[in-house]
Amino acid sequence: MKIVTICGAGIGSSGVLKVNAERALRALDLEATVVAADVSTVRTVAADAQIILTTQEFVEAIGKTNADVIVIVNLFDTSELKRKLEDALG
Amino acid sequence: MSLPPLPESAIDIGAFAADWRSAVALSGAALTRSGAAKPGYSDEMIRMIENHGPYVVIAPGLALAHARPGPQVITNGLSIVTLSEPVRFGHAHNDPVRVVLGLAIAEGGAHLAAVAAVANIFNDSSAIDRLADATSAAEVQQIMGVTPS
């Protein structure tokens, strides 16, 4: 499974999302490759992704995609991440 | 790799910012004081928010201000500005901001370990409040797990 985290520069928020998504996946005993990227590259990076993790601001720019787009509010809240990943994958 | 350097010069306690642009500019000024970024980095960080919205407010009360690696970055560095009065960035859930974390990254790719170190600190949900209430740079460094320079 491939998960892509998206933000404006592909460094800060998407990096935090990647680190915490990996943590949540471990807690859920799920395996996935998590890639952080900036929104301008979403078409190519997320072409084969099952899930896109991002914040509300980027939903419109991500546009139509086959992946499930999950919006995270508090990037440091691993319980929010766990709950939303479990909902999407369950 | 651990946390990017956070020297005392990159810490600004109880600063006043009239709006989010001033708050981000203060975090850029702190990165310039510590030698991590050139003065133009502030404008780059502000432009990221103008272009993409207030997504940098990544948790209640905390903004992670940063731009891309580029000529305005001198070396990896972190800055922390705590605000005397909370500032609204326009975020639907996580406003108002009390702590601005400024991040300068010199090269793409090598940044994830640094970001992971930041995430480790803030996965403790009390860290933001403790930073906002800190009264000295040494206290901020202690919360961030940095040995005072």
Image (cartoon, coloured by chain):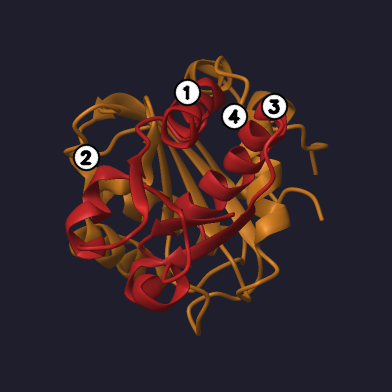
Chain colours: A red, B orange
- Mark 1 to mark 3: distance in Å? 11 Å
Residue B89's disc is 2
Same chain assignment for discs 2 and 4? yes
Q: CA distance from mark 4 to mark 3?
A: 18 Å
Residue to which mark 3 is pinned? A27
Q: Chain of mark 3?
A: A
The kind of residue tagged 1 is: Arg
Task: Tell which tag, 2 or 4, sits nearer the viewer.
Answer: 4
Circle 4 residues within 10 Å: few <14, some 14–19, many ≥20: many
- Residue located 26% across and 67% down the image: B47
In the drawing, does residue B69 fall left or right of residue B63? right
Subunit under mark 1? A
Marks 4 and 3: which is nearer the front?
3
Disc ID at residue A83: 1
Kindly identify the amino acid type of the residue bearing the numbered disc 2. Phe
Tell me which amino acid carries mark 3.
Answer: Ala
From the viewer's perspective, is A88 left or right of B121?
left
Q: Kindly check if marks 4 and 3 are in contact, taking CB atoms under 8 A apart as contact.
A: no
Residue at image mark 4 = B122
Packing grade of label 2 (10 A; few <14, some 14-19, many >=20) is: many
Q: Could you say where residue B38 lies in the image, as x and y percent from the top left?
A: 49, 74
Q: Secondary structure at mark 3?
A: helix
Instruction: State whether discs 3 and 2 lie on one chain.
Output: no
Q: Nearer the viewer, residue A6 or B148?
A: A6
**Chain to which the residue tagged by mark 2 belongs:** B
Q: Is residue B98 above or below residue A11?
A: above
Secondary structure of residue under mark 4: helix
